Image (cartoon, helix red, strand yellow):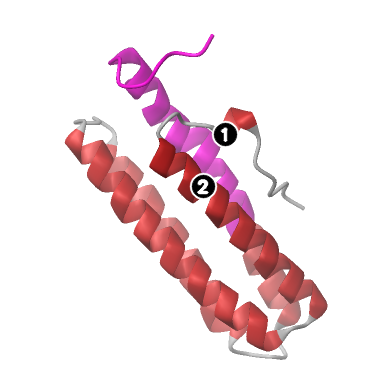
Amino acid sequence: MVDLDWHDYYEIGIDFIDSAHQEILAVMRAVREAIHAGNHDERLSLSRDLAAMIENHFKSEEAFLDEVNFPGLKEHVEYHKELLVQANQITEVCKEIDMTSNLTELFEAMEQFLVDDIFSGDIAFKFFLEYNGLIPRKI
């Protein structure tokens, strides 16, 4: 099971990005709890909220990266599209009450993908931001 708690090493150094990551992790924890509790209405509502949050966050993050001329933007956008597909699959599966095992597998895959996004995708642009003096470099 993926650790969905916020850790300082997830920090990018851009307030709106870090805040969004924290909020997404909080909603993911709530979705996980609703799945395990078998609360169909809550997991459906939360999964819709999560998909919308992720999509809005990606749009904001991509606009920011475009503004700072991040050279890996195209690849980062494609990476985000993959996660959005998974988030939307979770919402669709949440509509089916009897699909709990499939839902758990899909959700666990999305959890891992999101954490990977923070560690690999977002860390890449964090280094770019540090190198270009847009955020302070932490040693």
Residue span colored magenta: 110-139
Q: Can you say whether 88 is above or below 40 in the image? A: above
x, y (%) of residue 85? 44, 66
Which residue: 66% across, 35% down?
A: 7
Measured in 3D between alpha carbons, the distance from the residue under mark 2 to the one under mark 1, in whole angstroms, is: 9 Å
Mark 2 / mark 1, whichever is N-terminal: 1
Label 2 close to label 1 by CB (< 8 Å): yes
Q: Which mark is residue 130?
A: none
Which residue: 50% across, 13% down?
A: 138
Q: The C terminus lies in which quarter of the figure?
A: top right
Which residue: 47% across, 50% down?
A: 20
Q: Quick one: label 2, few (<14), some, or many (20+) residues within 10 Å?
A: many
Residue beneath disc 2: 21
Q: Quick one: label 1, few (<14), some, or many (20+) residues within 10 Å?
A: some
Q: Magenta-highlighted stretch: main secondary structure?
A: helix
In screen coordinates, is 116 left or right of 42?
Answer: left
Q: Can you say whether 4 is above or below 139 in the image? A: below
x, y (%) of residue 97? 69, 91
Q: Can you say whether 30 is above or below 25 in the image? A: below
Q: Residue furthest right?
A: 37
x, y (%) of residue 14? 40, 33
Quarter occupied by residue 13:
top left
Which residue: 44% across, 36% down?
A: 122
**Secondary structure of the residue carrying numbered label 2:** helix
Quarter occupied by residue 16:
top left
- Magenta-span inclusion, residue 135: yes
Disc 2 marks which amino acid? His
**Secondary structure of the residue carrying numbered label 1:** helix
In screen coordinates, is 62 left or right of 138?
Answer: left
Residue beneath disc 1: 10
Disc 1 marks which amino acid? Tyr
